[in-house]
Amino acid sequence: MKKILMAMALMALSLNVNAATCANETTLADGSRPTWNEWHDLQVNAVNRFKPHTQFFAYENEALAMKGEKANSKNFLSLNGTWKFKWVRHANERPTDFYKTDMDESGWTTMRMPGMWELNGFGDPLYKNIGLAWSYQINWEKPLDVPIKDNHVGSYRRMVEIPQNWNGKQVIAHFGSVTSNMYLYVNGQFVGYTEDSKVAAEFDITRYVRPGKNLIAFQTFRWCDGSMCEDQDFWRLSGVARDSYLYARNPKVQVSDIRITPDLGNNYEDGELLINVDVTGDPVIEFKLLNHNDIVVGKTVGNFRKMSNGTVRFVVRNVKKWTAETPYLYTLLAVVKDTRGNVTEVIPQRVGFRKVEIKDGQFLVNGQPVLIKGANRHEMDPDGGYVVTRERMIQDIKVMKRLNINAVRTCHYPDDPVWYDLCDEYGLYVTAEANQEGHAFGYKDDSETKKPVFAKQILERNQHNVEMYYNHPSVVVWSLGNETVDGPNFTAAYEWIKSVDQSRPIHWERAGIDGKNTDIFCPMYYSHADCERYAQDTTYTKPLIQCEYNHTMGNSGGGLLEYWDLVRKYPKFQGGYDWDFVDQALHRNPDFRYGRTVADYEAIAAKYEAGTGNMSPLYTYGGDYNKTDGSDNNFNCNGLIGPDRQLNPHAYDLAYVYQNVWAEPIDLNEGKIAVYNEYFFRDLSNYIMEWTLLNDGKVVQKGEVNELDVAPQKRCALTLPYHVPATGELMLDVAFKLKTAEPLMAKGQTVAYRQMAVREVKPTMQPIQPMEGKLKVKTDRKQNTLTVTDNDGLEVVFGKSTGLMGKYRVGGVDLLGEGGQMRPNFWRAVTDNDMGARLNRKFKAWRNPDMSLKAISSKKMSDNVVCVSTVFDMPSVQSTLKIDYTVHANGVIDVVQSLVTTKGADVGAPLRYGMLMELPYEMDKSEFYGRGPIENYVDRKESQMVGIYEQTADEQFYPYIRPQETGTKSDIRWWKQRAASGKGFCVTADGLFSASALHYGIAELDEGDDKGQRHAPELRKSKYTELCFDLAQFGLGGENSWGAWPLPQHRLGYKDMTFKFRVTPLSAQ
């Protein structure tokens, strides 16, 4: 349908339309020099800073404005690059003449901007989760004092050439992000001061500059009073993190701010656009709206003579709407003219028409109760720290699309403006968070951050966030900050935002379940049970969207499916933001380079993906740099993806649970399935569906469906033309792939998939038929061994003092490594979640439990069958273990491993129950029929489909930043382990089991009782290939990493258990 534009020049207008703007910035009484108390004065956050405004750049003409590249404008001058630099360790050592034009800087070094000091040889990176960065020296009698000791100061100087054609223009200095503060001088004169390190600081330097060479100098402190509001869970770094530049404007006729508010009317069909502008110089402004093809679809003219501000409104019939699924953007050009009709500047803005509401307890976008499949994202690069390039950002969004993430929270501060541009363009819902966290002061009523002394900081930080990022359609929620006690300071921030923006809801976790300072109930790490209770309680009327959940620290992410079962069950529960997107670890030797492309970054990430067998670089985390600074260890490594953007194993399950297209069984024996489209705004016309029928893991039939006519939130039924074989375990695999490429997604990319069991077959151990051969039992008193042997190279040797099998030789070939054993196994290398819940201490009796051999005996069942029985007393866990080995003449061994516990005993649970075999190192090739290929566990396995896979021991190892349990595969039917020579064996069981084969022993991976500074590349390989196979293993958990256990159904428990399995030499198969 042809779009009809109705442009209404509702100009009208009031001089006070935008009265509710940011408070004026503080100005010095004499305007000439600082007091140098600003850096530790909570009531001075800025001096002479330019008033915050929405993000825009004023170009000379429409052609440049349409391209949107500032660097092509003659009104732009980059300050990025090399600066003279002086760093001192303590604040009282800072040079006081750093700004003077005649200062001798010959003894100074250099620093690149942007760049973080600590990653360029100046000081150490410091990581804290909770607590001020100077917590190791804080004086709690004067908690608001900012220290001098260890408060590094960096001084910058650079000569800048101001173009001749800037003469007579207004010149603004823009510094994208400076941590923690900035004293700015130009040509020896003081310009101003700023804090709030995560938003741009601008200064009008017109009066200080001249055409030709100009000295720009500034000084920044590692810590200032503003740092008390930046107590975030990330690396504490210092320096300049984003682009810095100068820009020039017509000082007489200009737009000083432009605020765009989109809306939808007529049942969400028509677009409405409210444009508020602050102006200077009586301009006439021609507003043009262009569609995605750069075709003008409407325009109007506003005459702002004798006005300082005003409003224009557009109405667009049958508008193309913006959502994260369909990120359609228009371009608005504001062509500013003087009274003679001369164009003074052209301002472009990307516009997305969308409407955000909360109705009937649900969060709505364009009238639909969207699900928030979100992640928290810190701005972090393993080489650059806070410096994140545009290419890295694109890579991040590309990974988010791969993981089906549709929403991001800018934890815990405003991001680089480029990030919001990209979210607008590629489609992500953004919860835009202010740079406010006072976690160090706690949540009590007497908390410092609840007092008036912090009122100005908290309000201004929220004002900066809203003023600067207002125009982005991707921003659908404002967040007041993070982990600071709620109270009147946040009430003021909430009310101010509501006074300037009624188009978006506000999110504030500390407001709690029924607080007035939030429109969304947004807890962090609410349990499954708590989420369900809230969703069921009709007295609560706010939507539930967890601001943080699924704490993916180390080998984690268990229980995510159960969260999303609840989301999909209860309309009021609409999802959450995973904590968090990327591991914040740094490269030991940072190698930050400009010029890397997205493809360059992806090539690096691909080297370290799970399953490649490649060891990652050595990544550093908290505490790796010195023993003095406070540190929270590896608590900053909670990412879905690794520092180089490789997918961590738990990312695969999140991608699966978050997917938007689902196959559902109807009658699989008849080939009948349903396809459900969980999208809210797009159909499935760009997808094909491929299906594969597997019989005992092998493909027997396949096909595809090329046309999927499924509207949003609808289902369609399909009948697939396969026939069901009479025998075997049957699985139907379905995959949905893109017909044509989409932005950041390739043609043929799989976006959703599912495996459905047509016929499951429970694994059983069938009786072994009688065979030829004659076994005998030998006892060697000197070696203290019991051996089952024959005359054809079979030897199964048990230690009479240990009761353990120490040799397994079939046909003269050793299947155990020299000196190796097959022994019961009750422990895993503890995960971060295990340690957070203190399971490593609560269950430590199972790490190496006392196993006192009470009896070992043998019995010849027939000429070709011998049973060896062992009984162990395990006093430290108040249990008895009985193991029966039935040895057959062909080398097959049937094992029954029975644990008998003591009822009522106060003993923790084992972390696993199974067996470990120390194999020859070269016997490191696994083939298995079960879930794979990525490691998976009882509470994190849905993404891995049952099939037949082959992997080496190295490929099964994943180098978590802090070493821990890795490599396990679940729901195994059979597992073959072999060397390149072909020697090996197959493990089967009476039921499903789990297994892994690694070149690292559990003891080498295990942390012990306390965390140390350990890293994957420092691990020592075992002389064996260590094969673990288990009846069961404790779940991973993922609710949090500081106390929560896995869900009850995923725990192992202290109970009687019996594991029946069979080891069959490949030569006997």
Image: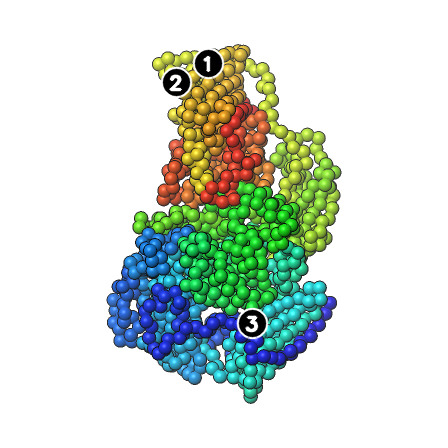
* Picture coordinates of residue 429, whole percent (x, y): 57, 59
Q: CA distance from mark 2 to mark 3?
A: 82 Å
* Closer-to-camera residue (217/741): 217
- Quadrant of the frame with the C terminus: top right
Identity, as a three-letter code, of the amino acid under mark 1: Ser
Q: Which mark is residue 390?
A: none
- Quadrant of the frame with the N terminus: bottom right
Q: Mark 2 highlights which residue?
A: 801
Identity, as a three-letter code, of the amino acid under mark 2: Ser
Q: Can the viewer see residue 371 in this picture? A: no
* Picture coordinates of residue 767, whole percent (x, y): 60, 19
* Picture coordinates of residue 333, whole percent (x, y): 58, 75
Identity, as a three-letter code, of the amino acid under mark 3: Arg
Q: Mark 1 or mark 3: which comes first in sequence?
A: 3
Q: Which mark is residue 857?
A: 1
Q: Mark 3 highlights which residue?
A: 259
Q: CA distance from mark 2 to mark 1?
A: 12 Å
Question: Which element is circle 2 on?
Answer: loop
